[in-house]
Amino acid sequence: MALVDIKVPDIGDFDEVAVIELLVKPGDTVKAEQSLITVESDKASMEIPSSHAGVVKEIKVKLGDKVKQGSVVLLLEATGAGASVPAAPVAPEAPASPSAPAPAAPVATAAPVVSAPAVPATPVTALPAHEPTAPTGLLPHASPSVRKFARELGVPLEQVKGTGQKGRITDEDVKNFTRAVMSGAQSTQAGGAANKGGSGVGLDLLPWPKVDFTKFGPVERKDLSRIKKISGANLHRNWVMIPHVTNHDNADITELEALRVQLNKENEKSGVKVTMLAFLIKACVVALKKFPEFNTSLDGDQLVYKQYFHIGFAADTPNGLVVPVLKDADKKGVMQISQELGELSKKARDGKLGPAEMTGGCFSISSLGGIGGRYFSPIINAPEVAILGVSKSVMEPVWNGKEFVPRLILPMSLSYDHRVIDGALAARFNAYLGQLLADFRRVML
Ligand code: CAO
């Protein structure tokens, strides 16, 4: 058995490269072509393979050493006469290019990888300079053997934190990542979508910015209220999962407002105040009957058409937003709706709404009319498919064909789930609602 010096082969254009990884130790049995060390220049990394099979007697380099073609890497006790192969460094894997065939990826990854064949004469594939702590969006820093190992396990390397030199991902990092995922301590980006029955298209978002605000000035911290936490999670889901579109339109409510003021004058003693919201609820029920798609919910591939008319309305309370539901609005007159609205609003402000008073809604209205603003995009209250936002009505000059006349105009913003409702239908719904509000007698037709 002969002792053989294993040397760095031709490494192309590089004079000197640094040893960044020792892949074997004395006593290890290696095969011909097995990687022994990893070296790195400022542009590339590659593995230096063994030209012989045998047992490692002595490692002649250490981490950080600079080596070049001909430098002795280790002393090997060669086994078998024909064990020698021409040594050629193994290039690291390169990001997939449009022309490169990508292997079937076991999990969705941001940057699929392809195997780059070892090319003896020009072994180096350019890699961008690696900054372990910065999210570069480029290929993670790992040796080809680690990449191969990760691929076998289906581990997305760009999600693995490297603990090796310069943040390099080691075999052990891949194993630890796998253990953490299996124990549930860690999730993968693809896992989120996969768990929801998705096809692996996750929201590949940047982490939330972590800022020490005290660096810029004094701050005070307060816990979110219970309602804010619950409504926030619901709003977030609805915003992300529903393809919203908002149609803005105007309603001329000049006559309706006059009627409302008149009714309130007449009913001063009754204690029931008629607000614009009560008329809106009544008009929406009529519009929902004319356009039944707005009174549905998506259930898989089916639409559930509701034959009842429970209308939710957003109520601003000291603790946050709640949505009480006024039941069977189709069976009630404007006065009864006004009375129930008053009761439900008070309960909402006092935090006394029961679960039954906040469930079962078909369609919601968010009225900011008492506060102000001109149009906004309300978020649909899932599993409903539409919501009407109304802003403050303002007296505006409107052209009547002969002259400008002052009219009270109500801005309406209808957000709808575009999976269920087409833009044209939404525009028709809003226009029809405008007609009803402009001439409330139409509600009876
Ligand atoms: N344009 C102009 N004025 C309006 C109006 C409109 N569209 N809607 C209501 N007003 C007026 C009312 O006439 C009333 O005036 P007066 O006191 O002179 O009679 C005043 O605004 C206050 O009305 P209100 O708020 O008491 O009654 P309401 O039926 O309009 O609203 C409720 C009830 C519970 C919806 C409301 O109090 C509320 O909480 N609104 C906020 C909803 C909200 O936060 N939506 C956003 C959700 S998305 O983040």
Image (cartoon, rainbow, N blue to C red):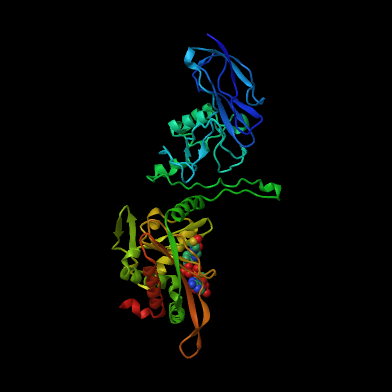
Image quadrant for the C terminus?
A: bottom left
Between 291 and 145, which is closer to the camera in this rendering? 145
Q: Nearer the viewer, residue 174 or 50?
A: 50
Q: Nearer the viewer, residue 27 or 226?
A: 27
Residue at the image position 66 percent from the left and 45 percent from the top: 212
| Residue 23: image location, x then y, percent | 56, 23
Residue at the image point whose x is 41% and y is 79% from the top: 438
- The location of residue 127, given as percent across then percent down, is 58, 38
Query: Is 380 or 348 nearer to us in this picture?
Result: 380
Residue at the farthest bottom position: 402
Q: Is residue 442 visible?
A: yes
Q: Identify the residue at the far top of this view.
A: 1
Q: Would you say 127 lies left or right of 278 here?
A: right
Vertical relation: 413 (above or below) 445: above
Q: Is residue 223 above or below residue 325?
A: above
* Residue 21 percent location from the top left of the image: 59, 26
- Residue depicted at 58% across the width and 43% down the height: 136
